[in-house]
Image (cartoon, rainbow, N blue to C red):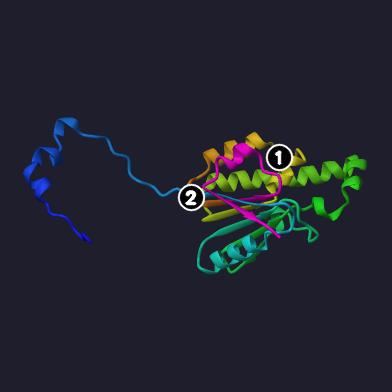
């Protein structure tokens, strides 16, 4: 097994390793990019591992934003976020989808508008956070359901991800994930029952 090789090549071929000042290459400084990770499942409510990991990351000193688009019941909203471990900000929609039956939402225009407005307000908050670079990790839980329900525009999500501050990780969860978003991911995890 060879552990190291000799330097004979570079010593005998100095012109290969010599860099001419006339041929300078403009090198860009390397910066670490955060990853886009997608957790997909065939059913809702399967992302407890993502939430557990976000809590662990916060306890280890990373600044984490956890946003649940379709969960509610505690009337959180953006102004009433829960802070845990000093580093985890947990935000839910102020008026959420999962508090009602789908038929009830579809049959009540005012209710549907209220849910859409509060979810869209949450999305606008997320866009600012993604562009700010202030978080080490942002989790967008069930964002694909918000896209499927036509509350959030898929192209708006793609554009925001492309223009985000790239040092933080972004985790997206959902059941029905558009192919063009799957192609953007650095990692895809499929959770099974």
Where 190 sits versus 12, above or below? Answer: below
Badge 1 or badge 2: first in the primary sequence: 2
Question: Which residue reaches farthest left?
Answer: 12
**Callout 2 crowding tier (Cα within 10 Å): few <14, some 14–19, many ≥20:** some
Q: Is residue 161 left or right of residue 144?
A: left
Q: Nearer the viewer, residue 64 or 180?
A: 180
Based on the picture, tell me whether residue 155 belongs to the magenta stretch: no
* Secondary structure of residue under mark 1: loop
Mark sitting on residue 58: none
* Span colored in magenta: 171-193
Does the magenta segment cover residue 179? yes
Find numbered disc 2 in the image and state the secondary structure of the residue it sits on.
loop
Measuring 81% from the left and 50% from the top, which residue is drawn there?
Answer: 97
The foreground one among 98 and 38 is 38
Q: Is 178 left or right of 110, judged from the image as shown? A: left
The residue under label 1 is: 152
Tag 1: Cα neighbours inside 10 Å, few (<14), some, or many (≥20)? some
Q: How many angstroms separate mark 1 from mark 2 (CA)?
A: 23 Å
Across and down, in percent, residue 86 comes to: 57, 67
The N terminus: image quadrant: bottom left
Q: Quadrant of residue 108?
A: top right
Residue 193, located in which quarter of the rendered image? Answer: bottom right
User: Residue visible at 9% across and 49% down?
Assistant: 8
- Write down the quadrant of residue 121 in the picture: top right
Q: Which mark is residue 34?
A: 2
Q: Which residue is at 58% across, 36% downward?
A: 159
- Residue 181 rendering spot, x and y as whole percentages: 60, 40
User: What residue occupies the far top of the structure in this picture?
Assistant: 22
Q: Position of residue 24 (x, y in %)?
A: 20, 34
């Amino acid at each position: 097994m060879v552990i190291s090789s000799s330097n004979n090549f570079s010593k005998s071929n100095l012109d290969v390793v010599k860099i001419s000042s006339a041929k300078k290459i403009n090198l860009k400084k390397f910066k670490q990019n955060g990853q886009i990770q997608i957790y997909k499942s065939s059913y809702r409510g399967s992302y407890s591992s993502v939430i557990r990991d976000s809590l662990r990351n916060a306890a280890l000193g990373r600044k984490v934003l956890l946003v649940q688009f379709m969960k509610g019941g505690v009337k959180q909203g953006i102004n009433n976020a829960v802070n845990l471990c000093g580093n985890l900000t947990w935000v839910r929609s102020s008026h959420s989808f999962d508090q009602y039956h789908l038929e009830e939402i579809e049959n009540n225009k005012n209710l549907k508008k209220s849910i859409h407005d509060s979810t869209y307000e949450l999305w606008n908050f997320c866009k600012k956070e993604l562009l700010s670079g202030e978080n080490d990790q942002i989790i967008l839980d069930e964002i694909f359901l918000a896209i499927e329900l036509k509350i959030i525009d898929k192209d708006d999500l793609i554009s925001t991800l492309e223009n985000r501050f790239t040092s933080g990780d972004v985790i997206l969860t959902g059941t029905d994930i558009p192919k063009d978003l799957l192609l953007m991911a650095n990692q895809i995890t499929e959770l099974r029952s």
